[in-house]
Image (tube, helix red, strand yellow):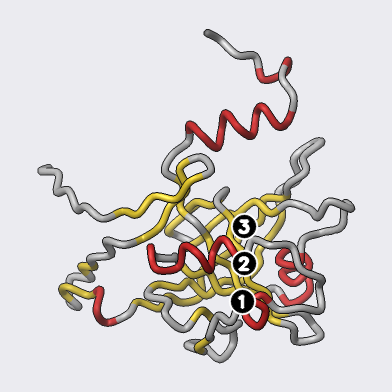
Amino acid sequence: MLIDFHNIDKLSRYKLMSNLIIPRPIAWISTQSIEEVLNLAPFSYFIPLSSNPPALIVSIGHKSDGSPKDTLKNLRDTKKCSITIPTINNAQAIQDSATALESNKSEFEAFKIETKTINQNYPPIPKDAQVAFFCDYLQEVQLQNSLTIPIILTIDSLFIDDSLIVDKEKLRIQFNEALARVGAKYFALTQEIEVKK
């Protein structure tokens, strides 16, 4: 079967892509509004873009009324975010934080997600975070007729919990419980496979 994406609706395209491009990493993004309200939301249209310069890309949609999601608005306003790579222990909190709240309400407070500050120049992250990238807004990519806005973020710094570090000198890390999206479901990466060169 060959499916012409020009002949199917947007929802069908989304369902096909999200169920077949798997697993997809989750960017659990914390931002802060100019009114200092902390926002936390998950995004699975997210991927590394470049290591030199270090950059990531994440696509962020709009609210049902057409206004920018809080994450997008906050990034445009403050130019900063913190991206946690969640683990299996965060599954329920991720689902909760995907709930649409009013802009003056914080997901951290609403769902009782404790925070910690690692880098003073960036928004706090969930307290049990094991990996987090501290990023700066670089630019938006304009896609014609798109409901989402791809945002390019440069990486300023990275937090790795000491428990994940196998060899500090060689920067060997074992991160087995990262959570990814497989269609509408979550998948925990729990097995390490070594491939010989």
Q: Amino acid at mark 1?
A: Phe
Query: Which image quadrant for residue 197?
Result: top left
Q: Is residue 31 depicted above or below 11 in this figure?
A: below
The residues bearing labels 2 and 3 have C-alpha atoms spaced at a distance of 22 Å
Residue under the image location 53 percent in, 43 percent down: 184
Front residue of 108/82: it is 108
Residue under the image location 65 percent in, 28 percent down: 13
Q: Amino acid at mark 3?
A: Ile
Q: Can residue 175 be seen at all in this image of the molecule? A: yes
Q: Earlier in the sequence, mark 1 or mark 3?
A: 1
Under tag 3, what secondary structure?
A: strand
Front residue of 163/48: it is 163
Q: Which mark is residue 13?
A: none
How would you rate the neighbour count of disc 3 (Cα within 10 Å): few for under 14, some for 14-19, many for 20 or more?
Answer: many
Disc 2 target residue? 97
Q: Which mark is residue 111?
A: 1
